[in-house]
Every structure is written in C-alpha cells, then in structure tokens.
Amino acid sequence: MSFEPVVWKMFGLRTITATVSLLASLAMLHFNQVDKAVAINNYIAVLNTVAFAVVGGLGVAALLAAYPPYKIAMVVIGILLTYFGTKA
C-alpha cells in the first residue's frame, strides 16, 4: 500500500509530537514537583498547538487543488474554531 507524501508528513509530525508529549509526561514523573509539571505541560501545550496548525495547514494545502474554495474555507474555519476554542 502506498501513501500520499502529504499523509506521510502529517503522520511524521504527529508521531514526533506524540513522542515528545510522552517523554514530557515521563519528565513530570521524574521531577515529581507540581511547579515543574505545570511548566512542562505549558511547553507541551504550545508544541501541540503549533503541530495542530502545521498539520492542518499541510492538509489544507494538499486539498486546494481537489476541492472548491468554499469547502476549503469551511475546513480552514473549522481549524480556526478548534484552535481558538481550545486556547486557554
């Protein structure tokens, strides 16, 4: 089975961010201090937000040629609503 190159990039970025998140959760246990755990969590929140935007952007860029502009606009609006709806 062959995969689209963009899907591989999306997969790779998500795999990297998932690995970093897992390592960060282990670091929280290692330090065993609430203040350090909160600081680590804040860094991971920023990383995941950036990853969400980049992966979403890759997906939208790949869809530009295949879908009409109004559908692309709906996807972009959905990404933005998710981003701003989850932003603390």
Image (cartoon, grey):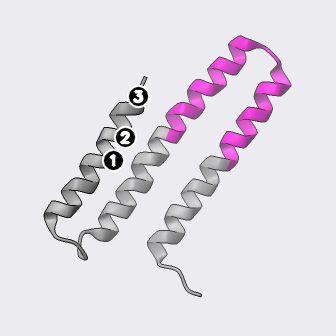
The amino acid beneath tag 3 is: Lys
Residue at figure coordinates x 22%, y 72% from the top left:
67
Q: Which residue is mark 3?
A: 87
- What secondary structure is the magenta-colored segment mainly? helix
What amino acid does circle 1 point to? Ile
Query: What residue is rendered at 79% in x and 34% in y?
Result: 26
Q: Which mark is residue 79?
A: 1
Could you tell me which quadrant the N terminus lies in?
bottom right
Give x and y (percent) for residue 42.
57, 25
Neighbor class of circle 3 (other Cα within 10 Å; few <14, some 14-19, many 20+) is: few
Q: What residue sits right under mark 2 in the picture? A: 82
Q: Which residues are magenta?
A: 19-48
The answer to which image quadrant residue 27 occupies is top right
- Quadrant holding the C terminus: top left
- Identified at 30% across, 42% down, the residue is 80
Where is residue 66 shown, x and y percent of the image? 25, 76
Regarding mark 1 in the picture, which secondary structure is present there?
Answer: helix
Query: Could you tell me if the residues under marks 2 and 1 are in contact, i.e. CB atoms within 8 Å?
Result: yes
Q: Give the structural element (helix, strand or loop) at label 2.
A: helix
| Snapshot quadrant of residue 29 | top right
Which of pointers 2 and 3 lies earlier in the amino acid sequence?
2
